[in-house]
Amino acid sequence: MTREDPRIRTALLSIDPTSACPAWHGAPSAVGLLRGVTVEIALWRPYSMANSVREIALHVAFWETSVANRLTGEALRVGFEQRKTGWPVRVDAVETSEWKDEVRLVRSCHARLVGAVAAFDPQRLDAPLGTRSTRPAIEYIHGVAEHTLYHAAQIKMLKTLAQKATDREKPSS
């Protein structure tokens, strides 16, 4: 992209490090971390009040959609029942097919955000984004990148802990 502003490029590298130039943090995106996550790992929690990988992934999808909506002017909604704004209702079980559908939802929300950021007019980066906000677009773009990275670290940690816990629970033969 020839018209890409360095501030957009930096945000894109944080949001989508699978692009041609990897992000400085060296970690995969939140979406990338969902590769290989089984439904058991997605629902596992280290203690009863902790969020699961599934809940965090859907939470990320909600906020990535919210920012993409602001950037594009559209009003698409993420399709999951919420317990509070942006957080899915806690469940103890989902079918594998439901989890796969949720991963597809997270991937599509992420792709939509990446497209919206990449297509955003750099001339509008310092202008308020929307009629009810005084925050400039660049704050939303970097804010959602930081938010997603924060939760990506949680997903990585929970995924690792869940894999170790579920390995211990398997009967040895």
Image (spheres, rainbow, N blue to C red):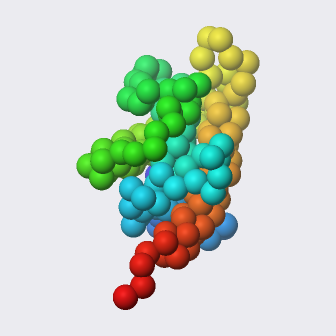
Q: Where is residue 95 in the image (x, y as percent from the top left)?
A: 30, 47
Q: Residue at x 39, y 66 (%)?
A: 36
Q: In this view, does 8 lie above or below 152?
A: above
Q: Which residue extends farthest top?
A: 131
Q: Which residue is drawn at 62% across and 11% down?
A: 131
User: From the viewer's perspective, is 36 left or right of 153?
Assistant: left
Q: Quadrant of the C terminus?
A: bottom left
Q: Position of residue 100 (x, y in %)?
A: 31, 51
Query: Residue 94 occupies which quadrant of the picture?
Result: top left
Q: Position of residue 87 (x, y in %)?
A: 56, 33
Q: Which of 137 and 96 is in front in this view?
A: 96
Query: Residue 39 occupies which quadrant of the picture?
Result: bottom left
Q: Residue at x 55, y 26 (%)?
A: 83
Query: Residue 141 occupies which quadrant of the picture?
Result: top right
Q: Which residue extends farthest right?
A: 134
Q: Nearer the viewer, residue 96 or 173?
A: 173
Q: Residue at x 42, y 58 (%)?
A: 40
Q: Is residue 128 above or below residue 157?
A: above
Q: Is residue 163 visible?
A: no
Q: Which of 83 and 120 is in front in this view?
A: 83
Q: Can residue 32 be seen in this view?
A: yes
Q: Which residue extends farthest left?
A: 97
Q: Where is residue 46 in the image (x, y as percent from the top left)?
A: 63, 57
Q: How many numbered discs sit on the rendered protein?
A: 0
Q: Which of 163 and 121 is in front in this view?
A: 163
